[in-house]
């Protein structure tokens, strides 16, 4: 605590927990990306809104940059502190603040994990429907920051749709209570929605009012093997038309190989280039009959080569593991990741162009892709060859990402579907947002954070 | 066209239709409020985006204020032009631009009416679910400007949730294509959501991509008569727990009197202080049995005094007319309107305070209220006594609205649920949004509209 700025912070905010040990700086200074060496000034662990507010005010006065920090499961470097910033971790602010059964609103502090929210909702007989593999570590504050999506978007939408209110300390130090849980509120700009997806550049989310909903009806889980890429969108169209989808996820044969090597269980003998995990309402026997008919239709059309329907919850979980274990199974290889989105209608043409582009530009790399067909969201993971230096690998991936970004632009897509821009995708933001939009965003940022202390360098300059 | 600024506009924007006749100035210079004398400089009726953009640029250079204008069915004065503004009417830009069945996106110009959108959606076998009585006149652009709600919010949410993309000419003259129909897009601030509800102060919406959904399942419509105010929330709780509501609307006995006098048909003999029109899914016979049981539960509890279930579409329409004809039946009396929202859980306590307040403060006025229980939205209509001058009446209503706003603030409510702030509610904005929020909104407005040409004086200074 020899830094006079930190001594000043400690003196001003009595009781604020501050960490400066090297191990802590490393732990809190990085997210799931591993491209930047963590180098924060210190780590602050506030336990009250007042402490957050005082810290933000101190940062404004002392000109210290702040990196708001949740579970640091991000994949875009949005929570990286590599330039002497103060990490402001919300992890101690992880309480449930209240539940109202009439409004069906669950109020939580920002540092609570997604999984804890799921459990509390379930305890009230309800559902918080945003869900994805990092649920055990990621936090609601981080979910808000990136407008997290995941595996249920085809049915329930993204985080944005479940946020009924946000309490935020803005970059200028003001405490904002945005929307306060109202269903209808046409009283000026919806700053709550502006905050969702702003990646910690406008304010620090300290608590959220989450809307809960009815639990989903009983579901059936099906694994499908598809003989070619065009079948993917065809089968999606078929299933969406006849069944009430809860999820429709796909991955490639290469992806399957990794997840099987990582301990998942093979569920089909067939070796096909594409696989789908589909989940749909199966309230009545009739739903299951329809699903079988739809499956048979797909087989008859030549779009489905093989499939299996889970006969138990354990088997459903095993099928899901094939999809959900992917990110973890690839992690040891430190893949370079793209997370792109298109309109569903643009997918077929884009997929062909993308496949050709990746094959041509990455002759030496293994490319693993998977994603959420129903949302038009693809995750591309490029694995470094063993004999390639990291810097050369990254340079190569960035060169190709530029080409990919140009292709996306032509197809009206986005360079970030759900991971956010952070540091990783900042160079490509202009493929998705126009210069005029970026100028307006810069202006808005200046309004909320006039001294530029919140996550500087992230999203855009 | 003697005004040199108009001559300049006409010269610059060849083909722009401009109206300057007094009748046109009156027609286009006001909305459904009648408190301000219309006095626009002129009316511009562009037919292309280029014309809108050129007009906004001209306005920036010449310092002329613009009032964006849709169907002018607004009730807050947001589309009033009383101070020499140029009315920019989107009424000629009312085309359907495209429909994509895979994305289920309907792209329309801003001037299309809500009803036309309903019809086009129906033609594609789908539903655009935002709906309310002004559907035949109001436009999508205006719906976006106020984040229109209406009678189906309890099931489908507000306009905000159905806007997949917006094309906007910002106040600075830049053309923005916001979100472009993507389901997932975490690439910086969601300026599309910022635009929704901004009442024409940030940009002129020129087209929108609307998400469509499955048509609702067959529904049953029920009219209920309730013996006292507390029964309202009780019956709502009962119905919501057991049925899938599509709408849950209420009105008072005084409201019923007006709509009956206006030609609607009496449906129940009972004379009770409160009435509800409920609509719920009735796909199977079982749903209808449940509805009957729920009704009987309500009767047994003493919360329902009488009721009727529509036996035909014609009868359902007749029941709906009791609710939907209200605004029109009151219009000749030129009521003063409040449009307030609360969390549903706050309603019971608030309703008692509100009823006492209105009874005490409006001893000489008739007060008619109705609204959307499921969204926590109440519409209060105060009718002027025949012998009271308009100015005195307004002054009285504004005095009481201040008290109402303070009550709302204590209960965490909003002074505008779905009508917007406009001119009418501007004095009370501070009851719903904090000084810090208003300062941020002012800053954001300055970013989008640096010369202050878009709807100046509306929303806030």
Image (cartoon, coloured by chain):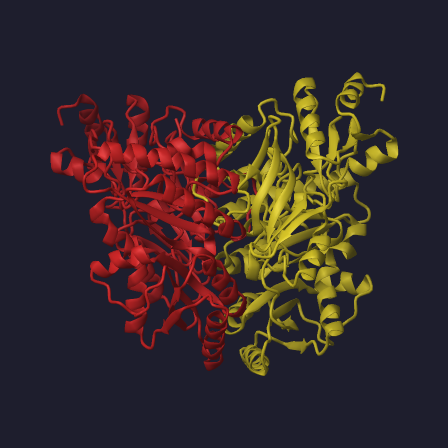
Chain colours: A yellow, B red
Residue B393 vertical placement versus B179 (above, below): above
Q: Is residue A342 visible?
A: yes
Q: Position of residue B65 (x, y in %)?
A: 29, 27
Q: Residue at x 39, y 56 (%)?
A: B130
Q: Answer left or right for B340 relative to A220.
A: left
In the image, B36 versus B363, the foreground residue is: B363
Residue A54 vertical placement versus A258 (above, below): above
Q: For the image shown, how many numbered marks are present on the structure?
A: 0
Q: Residue at x 78, y 57 (%)?
A: A329
Q: Answer left or right for B422 relative to A372.
A: left
Q: Is residue B417 visible?
A: no
Q: Position of residue B195 (x, y in %)?
A: 43, 40
Quarter placement of the C terminus of chain B: top left
In the image, A380 versus A210, the foreground residue is: A210
In the image, B328 versus B56, the foreground residue is: B328
* Residue at the extreme top of the image, as rendered: A4
Q: Position of residue B324 (x, y in %)?
A: 30, 58
Q: Residue at x 60, y 57 (%)?
A: A101
Q: Quadrant of residue A279?
A: bottom right
Q: Answer left or right for B33 relative to A177.
A: left
Q: Position of residue B73 (x, y in %)?
A: 28, 46
Q: Answer left or right for A252 relative to A334.
A: left
Quarter placement of the N terminus of chain B: top left
Residue A55 vertical placement versus B352 (above, below): above
């Amino acid at each position: 605590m020899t830094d006079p700025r930190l001594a000043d912070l400690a003196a001003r905010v009595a009781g604020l927990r501050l960490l400066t040990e090297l191990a802590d700086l490393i732990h809190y200074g990085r997210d799931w990306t591993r491209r930047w060496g963590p180098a924060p000034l210190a780590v602050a662990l506030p336990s009250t809104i007042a402490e957050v507010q005082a810290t933000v005010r101190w940062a404004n006065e002392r000109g210290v940059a702040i990196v708001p920090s949740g579970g640091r499961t991000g994949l875009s470097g949005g929570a990286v502190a590599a330039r002497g910033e103060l990490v402001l971790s919300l992890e101690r602010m992880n309480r449930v603040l209240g539940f109202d059964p009439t409004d069906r609103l669950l109020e939580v502090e920002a540092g609570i994990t997604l999984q804890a929210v799921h459990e509390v909702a379930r305890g009230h007989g309800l559902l918080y429907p945003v869900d994805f593999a990092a649920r055990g570590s990621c936090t609601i504050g981080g979910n808000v920051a990136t407008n997290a999506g995941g595996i249920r978007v085809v049915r329930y939408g993204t985080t944005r749709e479940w946020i009924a209110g946000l309490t935020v300390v803005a970059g200028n130090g003001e405490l904002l209570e945005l929307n306060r849980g109202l269903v209808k509120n046409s009283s000026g700009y919806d700053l709550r929605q502006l905050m969702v997806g702003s990646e910690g550049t406008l304010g620090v989310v300290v608590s959220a009012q989450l809307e809960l909903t009815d639990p989903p009806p009983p579901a059936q889980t099906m694994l499908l093997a598809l003989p070619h890429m065009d079948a993917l969108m065809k089968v999606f169209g078929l299933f969406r038309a006849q069944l009430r989808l809860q999820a429709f996820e796909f991955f490639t044969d290469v992806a399957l190989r990794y997840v099987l090597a990582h301990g998942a269980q093979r569920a089909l003998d067939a070796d096909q280039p594409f696989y789908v995990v589909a989940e749909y309402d199966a309230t009545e026997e009739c739903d299951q009959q329809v699903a079988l008919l739809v499956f048979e239709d797909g087989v008859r059309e030549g779009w489905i080569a093989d499939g299996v329907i889970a006969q138990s919850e354990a088997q459903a979980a095993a099928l899901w593991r094939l999809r959900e274990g992917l990110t973890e199974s690839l992690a040891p290889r430190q893949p370079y990741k793209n997370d792109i989105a298109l309109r569903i209608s643009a997918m077929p043409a884009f997929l062909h162009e993308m496949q050709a582009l990746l094959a041509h530009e990455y002759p030496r790399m293994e490319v693993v892709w998977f994603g959420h067909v129903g949302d038009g969201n693809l995750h591309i993971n490029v694995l470094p060859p063993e004999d390639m230096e990291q810097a050369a690998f990254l340079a190569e991936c960035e060169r190709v990402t530029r080409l990919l970004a140009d292709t996306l632009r032509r197809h009206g897509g986005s360079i970030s579907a759900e991971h956010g821009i952070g540091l990783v995708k900042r160079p490509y933001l202009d493929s998705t947002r126009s210069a005029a939009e970026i100028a307006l965003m810069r202006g808005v940022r200046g309004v909320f954070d006039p001294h530029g202390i919140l996550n500087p360098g992230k999203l855009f300059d």
